Amino acid sequence: MGRVNALAPHGPHDPDRPHDPARPGSPGPSASHAPSDGEDPVAAFLALRAPEGAELLAGLRSYDPAQELATATRLRRSHPAHLVSAALGQARLRQRAVAKFGAEDAYRMFFTPNGVEQATRTSVAGRRAQRFAAGGVRSVADLCCGIGGDAIALARAGISVLAVDRDPLTAEVARANAAALGLDGLIEVRCADVTDVDTSPYDAVFVDPARRGGRGRIFDPEAYSPPLSWAVGAALGAPRAALKIAPGIPHEAIPERAEAEWISDGGDVKEAVLWFGEGFAAGSYRATVLPDGASLWSAGPPPAPPVGPVGRYLYEPDGAVIRAGLVADVVARCRGRLIDETIAYVTGDEPYTSPYTSGYEITDRMPFNMKKLKALLREREVGVLTVKKRGSAVEPEELRRRMKLHGPNSATVFLTRVAGAPTMLIGHPMGGRDRP
C-alpha cells in the first residue's frame, strides 16, 4: 500500500514538533519563562493574568528584544523582578507566535516555548477543523492539546471541544487561550493523562502525539508519546478520528484503515494526518496545498509514470504531492514524463499550471560542469541565481559562491539527474523572470 519511495525527499522530516514536556511520557513542565528554584510555574503564569501582570504585558507588545536589559531595568523599578521576567518572556513568545497565529490572535494568547514551536499554524488547523465540520462532527476530544491551537480552530468551526493535556501549566495556558479568544463556552480544558480519558461521548477524536524525546526527533512511530499504536486504537474506537503524524512517516507504517493526507502551506510540508471513520476513504492518499486549499487524491497506487527527455518546461511538484506519492498524478495531468525514474521533476512540451506544481521554462541543458555553467551565466549577465537540487550532492551556497555572479539578470539552475546522468538545467519561472 505504498508509493514510489524513490520519488520522496531524502530522509524523514518533521518540521513542527520539538520536544514537549507537556505530552504523555515526557518529563517535567514547560514554562513561559525559566522559573527560579521553588517557584510554581502555574502560579507564575497566573500572576501574568492578574491585573498588574496583564497591564505589564499589554505594554510590551512592541518592545524591542534587543533592548531587553534596559526595558527590564526600567520595569523592575515599579514591578517585582519575577513578574517582569515572566512578562518579558511571554512578550518574546507572542512575537514569535505571530507567524503561526497572526498578530490579532497572538497578542491576546499565551504561550510556552515548546508550545510556540509545536502548535499547528492556524491555516492548517483550520483545514482540519473544516473537514471535521463538513462530516457533521459537533464534538471532538482533543488529546495532547498543548496550548490549544487545534482546539481553537475546532471551536471556531462551531465544534465543542474537550482539550486534554497532562501538564498543569500547559493545560492552564490552553484554558487562558480559550478565554482570551472568547471560546471558553465551546472549549473545556482538562488536565489529565489522555490514556485515562473516556472519549465515547464525543463525535470524533483528535490525537497529536509528541514526536521528540530527550535525544531529539523521534522517527519510530511506536516511540511517539503516546505510541502510534495507542493513538490508532483510540481512533478506531471513535466514529471519526484524525491523528497528526510526522510527514516523513513511511507509507508501509500507515494503517490500512486510514486515509493519509499530507498538508503543505506556502510550499512547505507542515504535517501528515491519518483520518479514520465515516466519510474518509481508507487506503487512499491525499495531498492538500494551502493557502489555495486544493487537494489531489488517489484511491490507490498510480501506475509508474513514463520517463523521457527534458522538454521545454520543467515542473516541480509541491512537497505534499511528493510525500503522498502522487507525482504520477501530476505527470498524467500535464501529459508529461519524469526526467529520471528516481527524481521527482516532471517535464513536458506544453505549458501547464496548477496549485500542485511550480513551473519553469528551460532554456539550456548541459552535463554537470562548473566551468561551463560559470561561462554561461557570465555571458547571460546573471547576477541573481536560484539554485534548486534533487539528486545532487552540491550545496547551493557553494555553487553560488563559485559562480562569482555579476549582472542585472536572473536565472534558475536545477542540479539533478537526467536518465541517471548528473545534469544542469537552466531556465526561469513560467510567466516571469527569477526574483532575488
Image (cartoon, rainbow, N blue to C red):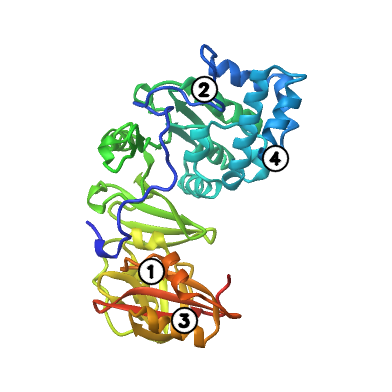
Q: Quadrant of the N terminus?
A: bottom left
Marks 2 and 3, the one that precedes in the sequence:
2
The residue shown at (43%, 23%) is 166
- C-beta proximity under 8 Å, tags 1 and 2: no
Image-based side of 373 in relation to 53, left or right: left
Give the mark, 1 or 3, whose residue is nearer the N terminus. Answer: 1
The outermost residue toward the top is: 38
Q: CA distance from mark 1 to mark 2?
A: 44 Å
Whether the residues at callouts 4 and 3 have beta carbons within 8 Å, the answer is no
Q: Earlier in the sequence, mark 1 or mark 2?
A: 2
Instruction: Name the residue type under label 1.
Output: Lys
Residue 64 disc label:
4
Q: Which mark is residue 427?
A: 3
Q: Who is closer to the viewer here, 133 or 228?
A: 228
Residue hosting label 2: 169
Tell me the mark number nearer the camera, choosing from 2 and 4.
Answer: 4
Q: Which residue is mark 1?
A: 389
How many callouts does the rendering have? 4
Residue 260: % across, % down: 34, 52
Residue type of the residue flagged with mark 3: Gly
Is disc 2 surrounded by few (<14), some (14 to 19) or many (20+) residues within 10 Å?
A: many
Q: CB under 8 Å between callouts 2 and 3?
A: no
For label 4, the SS is loop
- Where is 368 relative to 213, above or below? below
Is 241 located above or below residue 357 in the figure? above
Contact (Cβ within 8 Å) of mark 4 with mark 1: no
How far apart, in angstroms, are the residues tagged by discs 2 and 3?
52 Å
Mark 4 to mark 1: distance in Å? 38 Å
Q: Quadrant of residue 49?
A: top right
Q: Is residue 185 visible?
A: no
Mark 4 is on which residue type? Asp
Pick whichever of labels 2 and 4 is earlier in the sequence: 4
